[in-house]
């Protein structure tokens, strides 16, 4: 059979046994303990009512800690929610930029009308669509524009890559499509476009001198 525990007033103070300083009740707690003793018909001071008030203090302290912990968790949740919102906004913004970039660039090569407007808005550049007419239908200014483009893009001493690692034409090569020329995949094909540009410029200069 379990041995009955002794009354608290017959046991040693656990705080003293642990080498801790005893805590005293506040005036308000003493008044509450005195009122409790009076209601129970007990003399005061007594250990029973003092212990009850001390226990209430501990309970209140635990409640305060629990409340503080709850507030801290709530703050963490709010912070995490804000972080998720910021991340979602950034992702949406990046997605809009990607879509705008796709709309501004013609997948077959060159810029779309929206792309040319975007350049004008951002850089003040007044870009015009490439000349895709037959040589016989071109004006002198169109000959000059196309000839200048062809020599500038494909007549330079060292050409940029015309195909990527997967064998697909690069943006530099795809520019030919915007000017009505076959997309070059080899240096020889690029040089043929440059030679055509030279002929157009020569024809333009001859017409100007007449």
Image (cartoon, grey):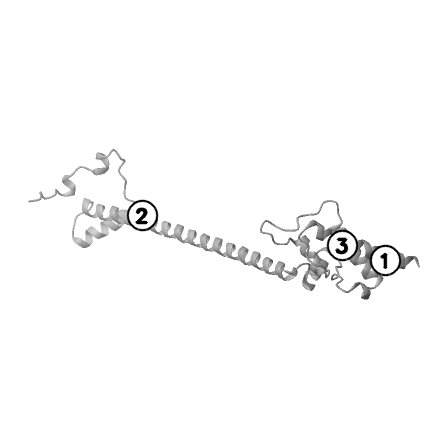
- At 72% from the left and 55% from the top, the residue drawn is 123
Q: Is residue 17 visible?
A: yes
Residue marked by disc 1: 203
Q: Position of residue 177 (x, y in %)?
A: 69, 60
Location of residue 140 with respect to 185 vertically, above or below: below
Q: Are marks 1 and 2 in contact (CB under 8 Å)?
A: no
Q: Are marks 2 and 3 in contact (CB under 8 Å)?
A: no
Residue closer to the observer: 128 or 50: 128
Earlier-in-chain disc, 2 versus 3: 2
Q: Position of residue 87 (x, y in %)?
A: 51, 54
Pointer 2: residues within 10 angstroms few (<14), some, or many (20+)? Answer: few
Q: Position of residue 45 (x, y in %)?
A: 20, 45
Q: Is residue 46 visible?
A: no
Q: Position of residue 15 (x, y in %)?
A: 24, 37
- At 85% from the left and 58% from the top, the residue drawn is 204
Label 3: which secondary element: helix
Residue marked by disc 3: 150
What is the CA distance from the residue labelled 3 to the residue labelled 1? 14 Å
Q: Are marks 3 and 1 in contact (CB under 8 Å)?
A: no
Pointer 3: residues within 10 angstroms few (<14), some, or many (20+)? Answer: many
Q: Of circles 2 and 3, which is in front? A: 3
Earlier-in-chain disc, 3 versus 1: 3
Using the rendered view, name the quadrant where residue 200 is placed: bottom right
On screen, residue 120 versus residue 2, left or right, reads right
What is the CA distance from the residue labelled 1 to the residue labelled 2? 96 Å
Residue closer to the observer: 93 or 112: 112
Q: Of circles 3 and 1, which is in front? A: 1
- At 19% from the left and 51% from the top, the residue drawn is 37
Label 1: which secondary element: helix
Residue marked by disc 2: 61
């Amino acid at each position: 059979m379990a041995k009955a525990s002794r009354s608290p007033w017959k046991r040693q103070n656990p705080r003293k046994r642990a080498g801790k300083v005893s805590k005293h009740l506040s005036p308000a707690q003493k008044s509450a303990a005195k009122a409790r003793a009076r209601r129970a018909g007990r003399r005061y001071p007594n250990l029973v009512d003092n212990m009850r008030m001390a226990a209430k203090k501990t309970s209140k302290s635990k409640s305060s800690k629990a409340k503080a912990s709850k507030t801290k968790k709530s703050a963490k949740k709010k912070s995490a929610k804000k972080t998720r919102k910021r991340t979602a906004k950034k992702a949406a913004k990046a997605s809009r930029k990607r879509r705008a970039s796709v709309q501004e660039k013609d997948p077959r090569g060159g810029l779309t009308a929206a792309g040319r407007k975007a350049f004008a808005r951002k850089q003040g550049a007044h870009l015009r669509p490439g000349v895709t007419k037959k040589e016989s239908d071109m004006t002198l200014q169109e000959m000059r524009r196309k000839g200048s483009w062809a020599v500038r893009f494909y007549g330079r001493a060292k050409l940029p890559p015309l195909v990527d690692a997967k064998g697909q034409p690069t943006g530099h090569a795809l520019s030919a499509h915007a000017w009505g020329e076959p997309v070059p995949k080899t240096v020889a094909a690029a040089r043929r476009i440059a030679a055509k540009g030279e002929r157009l410029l020569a024809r333009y200069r001859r017409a100007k001198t007449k």
